Amino acid sequence: MARIVQDRVSEEQFQRDLEKYRSRAIELGATDAEIIATEAIVLDERAQAKCSFPTCKLYNTNANCPPHTMPVREFREVVNRYRNAVFFKVDVTSGSFEDFDRVNKYGVTDIVWKLESEAFYDGYYFATGFGSTGCKGIFCPDTRCSVLDGESCRHPWKARPGMHGVGFDVYRMAAQAGWPLYPVGPSTNPAGIPYMSCFGIVLVY
Ligand code: SF4
């Protein structure tokens, strides 16, 4: 049952809720999840710039990819208003790029919107999540983004920017969390590395 929104949640309740979201991420399929303070969030303009150098095929095609996402300078101010987030990873161990793509798009997005929604209905009305990739390849691969045509998003409760699209330096954050990470690109031989990781985060409050 949804809780009423309180002026102030006790510290004990807040910590219990964070732990609940962390465990829930694992229940939903995350390989690991951490509660992090927002001081541990690393934002870097270069992460967002990598959407244009080399240019991603989603660049400038939808409202949740650069250059339509919030500038990192502005997003940093938003992040600084939060105290804690749940950061998680899903490792793909099958050695298959198809599995990696599926988890990157659907697996991570599913965890993100469910955690964000649970936190919202617990009264953390600023809860906001970000997944591994922008929404167009997930929800609108064969249609124009309606938002860019001045209409509503077709999937407003699930469509979010990918973490890098707003400037999260996911590589550094993974290293800080103690999660060894292998770079994955077109030249990666998936059979030559133990796993490929996908990431998501929900800023709780
Ligand atoms: S889900 Fe579709 S309509 Fe919504 S922002 Fe993404 S591409 Fe645009």
Image: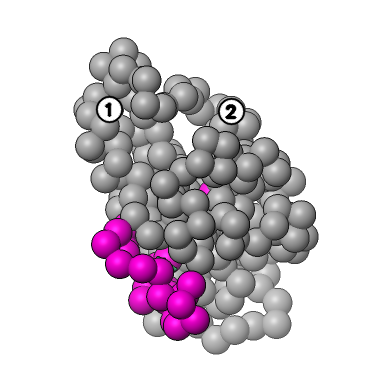
Name the spot of residue 95 as percent of width and height, x first: 24, 24
Residue under the point 49% across and 51% down: 59
Q: Residues within 10 Å of mark 1 (few under 14, many from 20)?
A: some
| Left or right: residue 92 compared with residue 161 | left
Residue 109 position, x and y percent, is 38, 56
Q: Nearer the viewer, residue 197 or 188?
A: 188
Instruction: Look at mark 2 in the image and give the residue it sits on.
Output: 175
Q: Is residue 163 visible?
A: yes
Q: Quadrant of ligand 1?
A: bottom left
Name the residue carrying label 1: 93
**Which residue is located at x 41 percent, y 39 percent?**
198
Q: Quadrant of residue 7?
A: bottom right
What residue type is disc 1 on? Thr
Q: Is residue 158 above or below residue 187?
A: below
Q: Amino acid at mark 2?
A: Ala
Per the image, label 2 sits on a secondary structure element best described as helix
Residue at mark 1 to residue at mark 2: CA–CA distance: 19 Å
Q: Residue furthest bottom?
A: 4
At x 69%, y 57%, the residue is 71
